[in-house]
Amino acid sequence: MKENERGKILLESGTNEIEIMQFTIDNNLYGINVAKVREIMMSAPVKPMPHAHPAVEGIFKPRDIVLTVVDLPYYLTGQHSSPDSRHLFIVTNFNKMYIAFRVHTVVGISRISWTDIQKPDKTISGGEEGVATGIAQCEGQLVTILDFEKIVAEIAPETTIQMKEIEQLGKRTDRTCPVLIAEDSILLSRMIQQALNKAGYTNLLMFANGQELWDYLRPLAKEPDQLDEKVALVITDIEMPSMDGHHLTKLIKSDNVLKRIPVIIFSSLVTEEMRIKGKELGADEQLSKPEIGHLVDVMDGLLSRKTKGK
């Protein structure tokens, strides 16, 4: 994918849509958000690394950066296969990391609405252990969208949310103001909730996607005098089935009553390109996962300013 083509995709102001890159492993169709993809490369020889996770092939240096290569076929199937020169590397960038994932073929890109992506039930996804974040229908084919953040968190736990960042904040007083959080990953939702509880935020309302949070929030616009008692702050991921975080932010900031609620976008997709879009939509702050300590600092600041402004 050329950089200018990718830029057009990222900076388009489409409402609640996603570009999905489809790829195959053993003739099964999978998908990844194009916003995570930097480029597609032909596979190349990889230098093994000692004591690495079994799914980590090793490293290679195509140009000026050393990339970790994850054997995605092995991760998904548990079966080792010989590297094939026809395989491809999908080079990704999220959580401020560059990682290459080996796949068998790349099929193409489809643009669909988040409302057309269904959250897999637990019999399919495996609950917290599953790596399917959604099921989409692209041009008549069912595509399993993988939770790449969870894959990386399992392979390298040190790259995900760290409770020690909260411990380093020291002793804190409890804050009982209601905070609404939209996060579709069961694993990350639980980790965020535990971390914020430890940081003193004891009144958290968790939602599985932007649509569920909006359904809760929208009726509160009719009760402006009680709004602050019902919601003090909204934190949202970007990638979510039904309604993404950008569309949720736009809805909140377009409402004459709800727009005074501070909105923090907390996502692995917060890059410079995405910051432009988030700012245009009215987000008060945008932070990259997994910086949970930074999130607490920003929450403290926004709520303090809100209190002083009353």
Image (cartoon, rainbow, N blue to C red):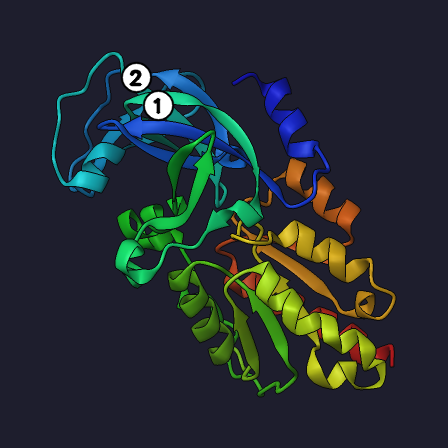
**Residue, x 23% and y 36% (percent of image)?**
56
Badge 1 density bin: few <14, some 14–19, many ≥20, Cα 10 Å: many
**Residue, x 16% and y 36% (percent of image)?**
50
Residue located beneath label 2 in the image: 43
Q: Position of residue 78 (x, y in %)?
A: 14, 41
Label tally: 2
**Residue, x 60% and y 61% (percent of image)?**
211
Q: Amino acid at mark 1?
A: Phe
Above or below 203: residue 101: above
Viewer can see residue 77: yes
* Residue reaching furthest to the front: 140
- First reached walking from the N terminus: tag 1 or tag 2: 2
Q: Amino acid at mark 2?
A: Ser
Q: Position of residue 180 (x, y in %)?
A: 61, 72
Above or below 293: residue 110: above
Given residues 114 and 228, the one toward you in this image is 114
- The disc label shown at residue 309, or none: none
- The disc label shown at residue 89, or none: 1
Q: Secondary structure under badge 2?
A: loop
Circle 1/circle 2 CB separation < 8 Å: yes
Viewer can see residue 283: no
Picture quarter containing residue 177? bottom right
Q: Secondary structure under badge 1?
A: strand
Above or below 19: residue 164: below
Given residues 55 and 117, the one toward you in this image is 117
Q: Position of residue 227 (x, y in %)?
A: 77, 81
**Residue, x 82% and y 69% (percent of image)?**
260
Above or below 67: residue 301: below
